Image (cartoon, rainbow, N blue to C red):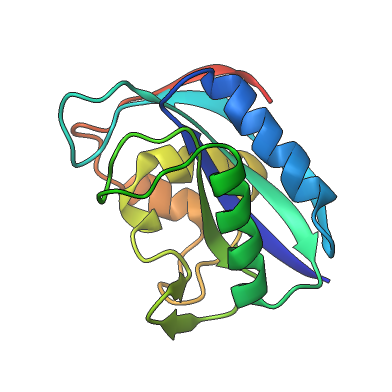
Amino acid sequence: MERVYIGIGSNLGDKRANCMKAIELMDLAEGCRVKAKSRFYRTEPVGVQDQDWYLNGVISLDTSLLPGNLMGELLAIEKQLGRKREKKWDSRAIDLDILFFGQRIISEPDLEIPHPRLHLRRFVLVPLADLAPDFVHPVLGLKVKELLKQCPTEGQAVTLMEEF
């Protein structure tokens, strides 16, 4: 089993229900077991205008799946929960991103681990710091809490909502 951190977000419909259902489905996936959940955060959309704010969080799970297989499971969960991939950074009922997969570094056309922009996104780093503040980014060599201190704040409001 390998420890994986997954970012969860929703800005369409019942955001909390979408996130909770995604967590439930990840825990039910073969070879996966959710270990911990961050708090919920209301977060400003990054890189786009005229979208509702997101609800974001992070979970840790242990998995026996290979990274590509886990990504396939996450994509299937997104589809099951109504995610439509029409254009980049569109509003979405659910978004599931592998942030870290142990200390693995993967660069493939359809899969990049660690997530290539996580160090620039407060909506990822704030909930990730709830779970793993001392986890060291395998490429950048910095702890999550250090990445958070360096992350820009402009246009990236993050407000605590409640516990998962």
Q: Position of residue 95 (x, y in %)?
A: 48, 44
Residue at left offset 41%, top offset 46%: 148
Where is residue 8 shown, x and y percent of the image? Answer: 54, 41
Judge left or right: residue 80 versus residue 32: left
Q: Quick check: 159 above or below 10?
A: above
* Residue that appears at 61% across and 43% down: 80
Residue 94: percent from left, percent from top = 50, 38
Out of 86 and 54, give the one closest to the viewer.
Answer: 86
Q: Residue 23 versus residue 104: which sits nearer the camera?
A: 23
Q: Does 47 sit left or right of 16 as displayed?
A: left
Residue at horizontal 47 percent and vertical 19 percent from the top: 13
Q: Is residue 134 visible?
A: no
Q: Is residue 135 above or below residue 145?
A: below
Q: Is residue 87 left or right of residue 75?
A: left
Vertical comparison of 14 with 27: above or below: above
Res. 84 in view: yes
Q: The N terminus appears in which quarter of the rendering? A: bottom right
Residue 42, image x, y percentages: 43, 22
Hey, which quadrant is residue 147 in on the image? Answer: bottom left
> Along the line of sight, which residue is nearer the eye, 96 or 115?
96
Q: Nearer the viewer, residue 41 or 47?
A: 47
Q: Tell me the quarter of the image containing the C terminus.
A: top right
